[in-house]
Amino acid sequence: MPKKIFFILCYLFFGASWVLAQAAPDPIRIATGARTLGMGKSFVGLADDISAIFLNPAGLAKADNWQLTSMSGKLLEEFNYVSVSGLYPTDFGNFGLGFIRSDIGGAFPTTIEAGSDPDNPIFIIDTTQDSMTYYNNLFIISYSDNLKRLFSLPGLSILGDRFPSLGDINVGLNSKLFAVNLTGDHISQGNAYGREIDLGIQGQTLPWLSLGANAQNILPATMGGKLQYDSGWEENYPAVIKFGSAINIIGENNSLYKIQKHNVKLLADIDYELSRSNDLPPLMHLGMEWKPMSLIALRAGIDQEIDGPNSVANNMTSGIGLYYGEFRFDYAFHQFAGAPGVDNHFFSFSYGANQLDTIVNSIELNLSSATTYDQNITLKGSATDPKIVLIKINNEKVDLSPRGDFVIDISLNIGINPIIVEGFAFDGKLIKQKTITIIRLTDYPDIPQTYWAYEQINHLATLGLISGYPDGKFRPEGSINRAELCALLIRAKLDETENIPAVTAQEFEDVPLGHWASKYINLAIGYGIAKGYPDNTFKPTADVNRAEGLAMIARFANISELPYANQFPDIAPRFWGAQLISAAYQQGLLKFLAGEKFEANRLLTRAEAVEMLYRTKPVANKLKSMINFEGK
């Protein structure tokens, strides 16, 4: 026993490194949480729960719910470790608090037995001295956020615009305060206080790969980064740079492979101690977490430690995690090569820490496409969180299988269909809500899928900009008259919420107040899209030729005239619409005529009018808002 106590004190005071004295012990080396200890302390790249406060504070930015965790355990059956930490997300970033206490009491001072072999000394209790006690308290205040929000602050928005990909990167900071006390063995002035800083960064480089780095204890001693005893004795905290990676090998989402509901993560970290001897080798931390189901996780790892000058020891670790709703229990077993045969057990209990893994994905949906022509679709899903006992879709109850799977047929309307999926606990509490958007596109029986403007016509019809005839057909090769084109362009110009004012005065002799298109014609004249004739007529039923139709659509899209560059062999530079044709061609409105004649006097077909309108920026923006529904 005395020999073991001597080893414990050496391990603590010299940080398991026999090559440098005056190294202050940082209890984060052990008290990282049972989950991370079970994975060999390889967590810098993953850092997906409250344990990130110890190994990479940048990972705290991932949380969207408050979390608590605690850990207790013994090192070498003698030294007690206790930690408590929590985080709270806000609109200004995520804040965390942590406390670690490591202590030992009643440790007897030892001395080398007289006459023992110097190469294999025998330590015996020194009864002439008082027993020793020791504690090391660490208080942590953390802040973390993603760069996307930080770049939205005044003065930094230019960075967000210039480097949009940086929005996926999280950053974090730990401010650490130490309080140490050592008594016994005639020790006086054994109180000490210190402070340090950790900086972390983490990002998702690929859907299945995340990388991270953490710089621990980087506050220079000249700025207070040290432990100072009342006696004046000072010790520096070893500065460590940690790099880590996390690979999602198997999983239902964002993984290399998918095997049912299994989830396997492989983790690898490497440590470089900057403030120690250059002869110190880097340390590796390797870990694996396998979740065969949502209720359990099995873990294993290798935690390397310095075992002597230029020597590294591989400490084997293992652990298990049990999940129930928002609660998680973790156990870890950790070997230490310097004390073979001594069991080291650590336990953690957490609230909210598994929500990043299960609650966020507590409702999994399987949908083959977000756009469809079908009136009815089948939506499949599963409630992966065991606390969810009831699913409602658009406020309608859905039957759940014993495994939490559900299947439902949904009827769709033309256009955008929001589908709200909610998961409830037994007491009626809402656990998770997801909203997806399904777009049902319009189609016409007289337009086959092989028709050149099939997509353009159906998309504009879905937006409500165009409509078919009473018999359900669209007649794409039919002509379009001036009144119809005015109506089409005004619908495209106005938002759905804008009302078209009623006509109170007759503008043209041939457009009476009761004419179906009078309000569209008046607005088109007001916007400068259309023009009347000198005899105060509009000729609403007159079919539009290509040149006239292009002129109206170009004015609708605010396309300015450009010098004619002989894009079409049948259009002379002196033609009245040549410059508008040139501008429309360069903006892509006339792609369907590439390599052909323009034929200015040829009647514009309904399909051609839709095609040109489809290529304009105002309509493209409307289409983008409809199709690009991510986040709705």
Image (spheres, helix red, strand yellow):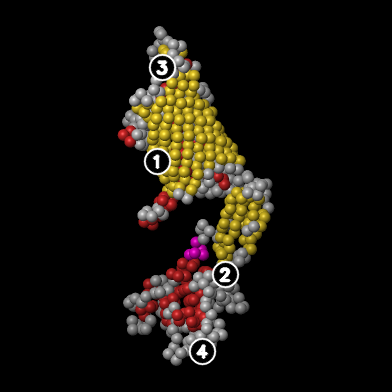
Q: What residue is rendered at 51% in x and 89% in y?
A: 510
Q: Which residue is disc 1 drawn over?
A: 199
What span is colored magenta in the figure? Answer: 624-628
Secondary structure under the numbered disc 2 in the rendered image:
loop
Label 1 packing within 10 angstroms: few (<14), some (14-19), many (20+): many
Marks 2 and 3 sit apart, C-alpha to C-alpha, by 89 Å
Tell me which secondary structure the magenta stretch mostly adopts.
helix
Q: Is residue 450 above or below residue 356?
A: below
**Residue 436: percent from the left, percent from the top?**
56, 58
Determine whether 526 is above or below 396 in the image: below
Q: Which mark is residue 398?
A: none
Q: Secondary structure at mark 3?
A: loop
Q: CA distance from mark 3 to mark 4?
A: 112 Å
First in sequence: mark 4 vs mark 2: 2
Please tell me whether residue 278 belongs to the stretch shown in magenta.
no
Side of 222 where 249 appears, left or right: right
User: Three-letter amino acid code at disc 2?
Assistant: Thr
Helix, strand or loop for disc 1: strand
Query: In the rendered view, would you say 623 is above or below 404?
Result: below
- Residue that label 4 marks: 510
Three-letter code, disc 4: Asp
Residue type of the residue flagged with mark 1: Leu
- Alpha carbon distance from label 2 to label 1: 54 Å
Residue that badge 2 annotates = 442
